[in-house]
Image (cartoon, rainbow, N blue to C red):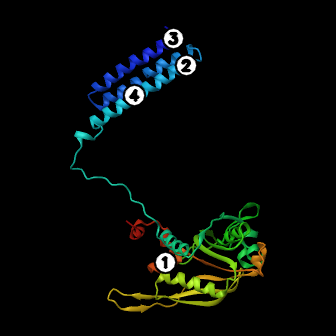
């Protein structure tokens, strides 16, 4: 008989011993001792047999290894079945379980209220034909400012407002660079929503934080007019705030849009007693027609293509929806506050 046959016979004999011992184990402590005895990596009996592989010819070793794996799997399976039959005796479970003790429940997570608002905003724009786009949070001056028609002597470029990194990079101050990257990589038509984190050198207060979520949109195609711009944002506002919502566009200025506008809404609130009340005008976003200079920076033909862009802060939108006056409460991680927004 060869050395290979001897080892295989030894493994089969060990299989029978292990299965008999496991079947007779009276409790989980004895079962654990058997696991160490037969399957232990260092001193287990199966491991001891495998140490004899070194004395075999290379072509004989695979057969012994395969048999050892078969025996180990079979013994392990028998131990798992025995453990289940014992019901975890000696571990505080099974027959020894005290049913008078209160049960423990796992922590139930939930989406942050600002995340819930972002998801709702995205669902509205997706139903209007928009797709979602992303970009890096670390940008260059060109993507963050110059390509967006913002000269380097603009106050927003100053270190008092922007967080600069090494080698000329910075933390993006808005998600508008995603618009530039999208236009540089795709030909019109373009209809995107770009949510993401942005960073500014702001002192935290009731309406500002150094890092916050922003959501921007961009539409570029042939024949896009100011009428399309107003109709799209008015439709969004009524879907989000309610069909009775009034929308107002006020002239404003942004380097990357011309003409530019601030978008305000005036909502109709129904009180618990059934009475209806109009709110004051509330600003929800900045927007405008894409400046032709921005389209030229990405190589678009401004005689052929036009577009509009808009941007809003989901935290501000959430604060307006829930009547919250200080947005810092969104980020204090107070579970008493966050649990109010938990969804089943």
- Look at the picture and state if 87 lies above or below 256: above
Q: Quadrant of residue 108?
A: bottom left
Asked if marks 1 and 4 touch (Cβ < 8 Å), the reply is no
The residue that label 2 is drawn on is 61
Residue 113 percent location from the top left of the image = 46, 70
Disc 4, SS: helix
The residue that label 1 is drawn on is 319
| Mark sitting on residue 155 | none
Camera-nearest residue between 185 and 120: 185
On the rendered structure, is 22 left or right of 190?
left
Q: Residue at image x 39%, y 23%? A: 37
Camera-nearest residue between 252 and 62: 62
- Which label sits in the foreground, 1 or 4? 4
On the rendered structure, is 184 left or right of 230?
right
Camera-nearest residue between 259 and 228: 228
Residue 189 percent location from the top left of the image = 68, 74
Q: Earlier in the sequence, mark 1 or mark 2?
A: 2
Q: Earlier in the sequence, mark 2 or mark 4?
A: 2
The residue that label 3 is drawn on is 3
In 3D space, how far apart are the residues under numbered discs 1 and 4 (Cα atoms)? 60 Å
Q: Earlier in the sequence, mark 3 or mark 4?
A: 3
Residue 53 percent location from the top left of the image = 54, 17
The residue that label 4 is drawn on is 74
Most extreme residue toward the left is 100
Q: Earlier in the sequence, mark 1 or mark 4?
A: 4
Q: Residue at image x 78%, y 82%? A: 303
């Amino acid at each position: 008989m060869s050395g290979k046959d001897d080892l295989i016979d030894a493994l089969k004999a060990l299989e029978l011993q292990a299965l008999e011992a496991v079947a007779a184990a009276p409790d989980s402590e004895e079962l654990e001792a058997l696991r160490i005895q037969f399957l232990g990596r260092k001193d287990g009996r199966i491991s001891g047999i495998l140490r004899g592989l070194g004395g075999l010819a290379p072509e004989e070793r695979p057969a012994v290894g395969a048999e050892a794996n078969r025996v180990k799997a079979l013994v392990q399976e028998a131990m798992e079945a025995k453990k289940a039959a014992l019901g975890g005796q000696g571990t505080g479970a099974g027959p020894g379980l005290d049913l008078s003790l209160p049960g423990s429940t796992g922590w139930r997570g939930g989406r942050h209220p600002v995340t819930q608002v972002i998801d709702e905003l995205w669902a509205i724009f997706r139903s209007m034909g928009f797709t979602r786009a992303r970009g890096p949070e670390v940008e260059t001056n060109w993507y963050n400012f110059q390509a967006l028609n913002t000269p380097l002597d603009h106050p927003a470029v100053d270190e008092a407002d922007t967080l600069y990194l090494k080698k000329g990079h910075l933390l993006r101050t808005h998600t508008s660079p995603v618009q530039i990257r999208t236009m540089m990589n795709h030909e019109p038509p373009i209809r995107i929503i770009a949510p993401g984190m942005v960073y500014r050198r702001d002192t935290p207060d009731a309406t500002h934080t150094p890092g916050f979520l922003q959501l921007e949109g961009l539409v570029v195609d042939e024949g896009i007019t100011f009428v399309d711009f107003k109709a799209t944002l008015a439709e969004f506002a009524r879907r989000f705030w309610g069909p009775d919502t009034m929308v107002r566009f006020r002239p404003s200025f942004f380097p990357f849009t011309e003409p530019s506008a601030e978008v305000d809404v005036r909502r109709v609130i129904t009180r618990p007693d059934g009475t209806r009340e109009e709110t004051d005008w509330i600003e929800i976003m900045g927007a405008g027609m894409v400046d032709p200079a921005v389209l030229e920076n990405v190589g678009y033909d401004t005689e052929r293509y036009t577009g509009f862009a808009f941007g809003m802060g989901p935290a501000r939108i959430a604060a307006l929806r829930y009547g919250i006056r200080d947005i810092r409460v969104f980020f204090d991680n107070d579970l008493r506050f966050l649990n109010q927004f938990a969804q089943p």
